[in-house]
Amino acid sequence: MLGLAADNASVMMGHISGVQARFRTILPNIFILGCVCHSFHLCSSAAAKKLPRTLEDFIRSIYNYFAHSSKRKEKLEEFQKFVDLKPHKILHPCQTRWLSLQVARELGCP
């Protein structure tokens, strides 16, 4: 075995009794890599906590404004076409999807 890639849970990456520690006792030169996407998400989440709560509330309010009205969605699509944007749906920002708040912000404010 040359390497191990795993999520960043302590059961996998723990330095004392994690899977990676057990592999290192058998294979001291093994290449260990934590999940880059998960690490990026943790960094982004920590950075987002430094932003004012009002920004997240504003993004959520944009979603709520369009989400429950077919007429508003239709007007949004008309506007997107008018300003030469590819029509797209407003994404629901949520905590369980990686970086969904960032994607929702990018689509709303390219």
Image: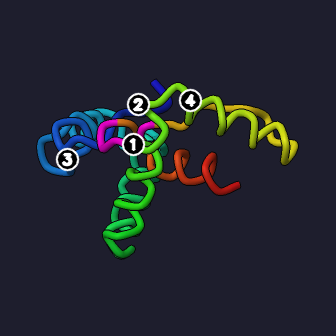
Would residue 43 be counted in the magenta stretch? no
| Labels 3 and 1: the sequence-earlier one | 3
Mark yes or no: residue 71 visible.
yes
Question: Mark 2 against mark 3, which lies toward the viewer?
Answer: 2
Q: CA distance from mark 1 to mark 2?
A: 7 Å
Q: At 63% across and 46% down in the image, what residue appears? A: 107
Kind of residue indicated by mark 1: Asn
Question: Mark 4 against mark 3, which lies toward the viewer?
Answer: 4
Kind of residue indicated by mark 2: His
- Residue denoted by label 1: 64
Q: CA distance from mark 2 to mark 3?
A: 45 Å
Whether residues under marks 1 and 2 lie with C-beta atoms below 8 angstroms apart, the answer is: yes
Which quarter shows the C terminus?
bottom right
Left or right of 105 in this view: 65: left
Q: CA distance from mark 4 to mark 1?
A: 13 Å
Q: At 34% across and 60% down in the image, what residue appears? A: 57
- Residue denoted by label 4: 71
Q: State the extent of the magenta-drawn residues as a range.
A: 92-96
Q: Residues within 10 Å of mark 2 (few under 14, many from 20)?
A: few
Kind of residue indicated by mark 4: Lys
Mark yes or no: residue 33 visible.
no
